[in-house]
Amino acid sequence: MSHLLQKLLPYIILSVAGFASFFAFSPYRQVWIMFLTIPCLVFYINEAKTKKQAVFQAGLFGGVFFETSLFWAVKGLFSEYGLLVYFLFVLFLFLMGFFFYGTIAFLSHFFKKGLSRIIAFCCLLSLSEYVQSYFIFQLSWLFMASAWVSYPKMLQFFSIAGTFGYGFFTVFIFTSPLFLLTKEKHYKTFILAVILTGGIFLYGDKRLENTRDSEYVPDINLRLIQKHQTKSLNDIPAYITPVLFDNEIYFALKKPLAVKGKNILFFPEAFIRSRIQDEPLLFQKPLEREYPDFYILTGSLRKIEGKKVYNSILAVDNKARILNSNDKYKFVPVGEYIPFIENFRNFSRGKGPKTFHLDGVPAVGAVNCVEITYPRIFIDQKDRPKWIANITNDSVYLNELGSYQYLIFSQLRAVEEGLPVVKISTPYGISAVINPYGEIEAFLPRGTTDTLDARLPKALPPTFYAKYGNIPFLLGSFLLLVACAAVSFCKKNTGTPEDGTEVPDKSEIIPGKREKAEPSRSSTTRKEKEKQRQQRAEKRKKRKKQ
């Protein structure tokens, strides 16, 4: 029984570690937990005797971590599709986590045990987040670096490294306690991790010194309307039409707008659900006389080209004219999109990110819902905006956990690109105005139906990440993996193997001469014993003669 428990103990520990890691992220934000759970994961990957053992141990950690962190995303499937579909998606989340972490462990075992394997693991984990976001499953969630969101000074490093580059440094920092626990005692590497942490903190402290409360775009006034509570797409009544949208506008305009400058009204994603067919007028009565200067940015479903339905963002002026639109091109995993199954919600994909140019307003990137979770590609880099309008509907399968997790992506993207983000949601989410440093300047809390007036923060010059994107991260990861592979290869061929015995260097053997084999330890001991027997025999003979 004790032998069985000893075998199962690593799997039990890693399951608990995977579960506990969830609490390091929003809304709990207990980052210190990762200094226990990540070293635990890396230790077992490093010490695993076989690749199979490493895959199952790391896969169990990843499966439990994904399951715990994302169970809320499929919770709505239970009431909508029944227990079987809900169970299948719960299983899918576990297998997805198992796949990514198991693959990382498998690849890590091609590197030499010790520091090379640990550094390779850090690279591979951050690369897996990159692949997970843009390629396999396209689930842009659960980034290791997002654990720093509650530490403004640590958050600023996103402006240099981005989500994936910072992911490598984050895992390296979390792993640092392990450097003191290995047999080799990598004190220098531990000190490097401490210096790196301090450097990131000091960079963030210096960057935040530049913040000014008065740095706002002049004559731009924002009004966020957080309205209509619904739990899922099917629960939303189709009462908000271009005709009845008049009433919603008058509701939003009950409080007088600012007289000076341009006013921008924001409504949530899919707020208009009549599936309009590019009608020239969004609402019936133009309001240019009563309200001479305002624009509306609203979510709307629109039906064009026969049966195609798009989830769109519309820009409308005070004359009721639709000035511009952008169709959603990234769908919510499970809620609107299932990998390998197109048109799960009968939505058609848009062409990609788009920047709206409105008279008297800085260029705005119209970002629809989950698109903001995808670093770099969520805005049009060729037509770079001055600020971001993130139109969301957090009602879709999101509870309190999802709402807070959703909010942090707006903060991360703001720091990465150096652009302010205006996030508008339904009352099941959180609406906020976020400055380019990731700080929330104004917000409407979850569960409230209200309006919020705010000013638009100024954009910063393009950050290092905004200029170069993920290229430094990918190049750096490649070079590090090559270096780890080279060190592993050299140690296997000319270095000291894991058991500590030295391997003879064949290059020192002179051709034509036979290397004299050193007597083995066993043969030496036999000769000594034989000599001792002879000596004892001679002593016996002498005694007999006497």
Image: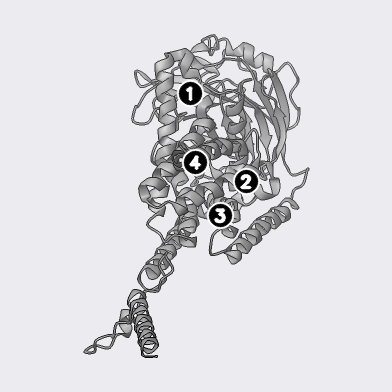
Question: Which kind of residue does numbered mark 3 sit on?
Answer: Phe
What residue is at 60 percent from the left and 59 percent from the top?
180
| First in sequence: mark 4 vs mark 1 | 4
Q: Are marks 2 and 3 in contact (CB under 8 Å)?
A: no
Q: Which residue is mark 1?
A: 74
How far, Cα to Cα, is label 1 from label 3? 32 Å
Instruction: Judge by depth and name the residue closer to the eye, 38 or 245.
Output: 38
Q: Which residue type does callout 2 highlight? A: Val
Callout 2 touching callout 1 (CB < 8 Å): no
How many circles with numbers are drawn on the protein?
4
Residue shown at 55%/23% (left/top)? 398
Choose mark 4 or mark 1, whichever is in front. Answer: 4
Q: CA distance from mark 4 to mark 2?
A: 41 Å
CB under 8 Å between discs 1 and 3: no
Secondary structure at badge 2 equals: helix
Of the image marks 4 and 2, the number of the one nearer the N terminus: 4
The residue tagged with tag 1: helix, strand or loop? helix
- Name which of mark 4 and mark 3 comes first in the sequence: 4
Element carrying mark 3: helix
Q: Which mark is residue 275?
A: none
Amino acid residing under circle 1: Val
Q: Earlier in the sequence, mark 2 or mark 1?
A: 1
Determine whether, in the image, residue 344 is placed left or right of residue 202: left
What kind of residue is marked 4?
Leu
Circle 3 sits on which residue? 172
Q: Is residue 85 visible?
A: yes
* Residue 9 numbered mark, or none: 4
Residue that label 2 marks: 415
Few, some or many residues within 10 Å of mark 3 (<14, 14–19, 20+):
many
Residue 339 found in image quarter:
top left
In front of the other: 63 or 71 = 63
Mark 1 packing: few (<14 Cα in 10 Å), some, or many (20+)? many
